[in-house]
Amino acid sequence: MLGLLTIPHSSAHCERVFSAVRKIKTDMRSSMGTATLEALLVLKHRQTDVISLKEPALIDRLKKAYTLSLA
């Protein structure tokens, strides 16, 4: 099987990822773990799919978790 290596013509995608990380991981959130940061980046990337999510049980769990985190 012949393998093919491609090199992107620009670094725009990488720059967008680093920009998103800088927006999410601020100084106030510097103690954020890698798993949480990765999950937030996935949500940011797939936000149109997440916005269209209409699962009431999941929405209720997220509301409850958010309320508990504020307490």
Image: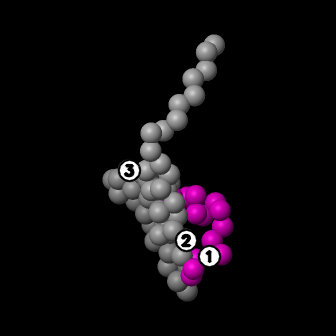
29 or 68: nearer the viewer:
29
Q: Residue at x 65, y 62 (%)?
A: 34
Secondary structure under badge 2?
A: loop
Marks 1 and 2 close (CB-CB < 8 Å): yes
Report x, y in % for residue 64.
50, 73
- Seen in the picture, residue 34 relative to 65 is either above or below; the reply is above
Left or right, 66 with reference to 55: right
Report x, y in % for residue 25.
55, 71
Report x, y in % for residue 39.
55, 58
Quadrant where the C terminus lies? bottom right
Residue type at mark 3?
Asp
For the magenta stretch, what is the residue range? 27-41
In the picture of the structure, the residue carrying the numbered disc 3 is: 49
- Seen in the picture, residue 42 relative to 1 is either above or below; the reply is below
In the picture of the structure, the residue carrying the numbered disc 2 is: 25
Please report whichever mark, 1 or 2, sits nearer to the chain's N-terminal start. 2
Q: Which numbered mark, 3 or 2, is in the foreground of this view? A: 2
Q: Residue at x 44, y 44 (%)?
A: 10
In the picture of the structure, the residue carrying the numbered disc 1 is: 30
Secondary structure under badge 3?
A: helix
Residue type at mark 2?
Lys
Quadrant where the N terminus lies? top right
Residue type at mark 1?
Ser
Quote the CA–CA distance across marks 1 and 2: 6 Å
* Number of other residues with Cα within 10 Å of mark 3, as a class: few under 14, some 14 to 19, many 20 or more: few
Q: Which numbered mark, 3 or 1, is in the foreground of this view? A: 1
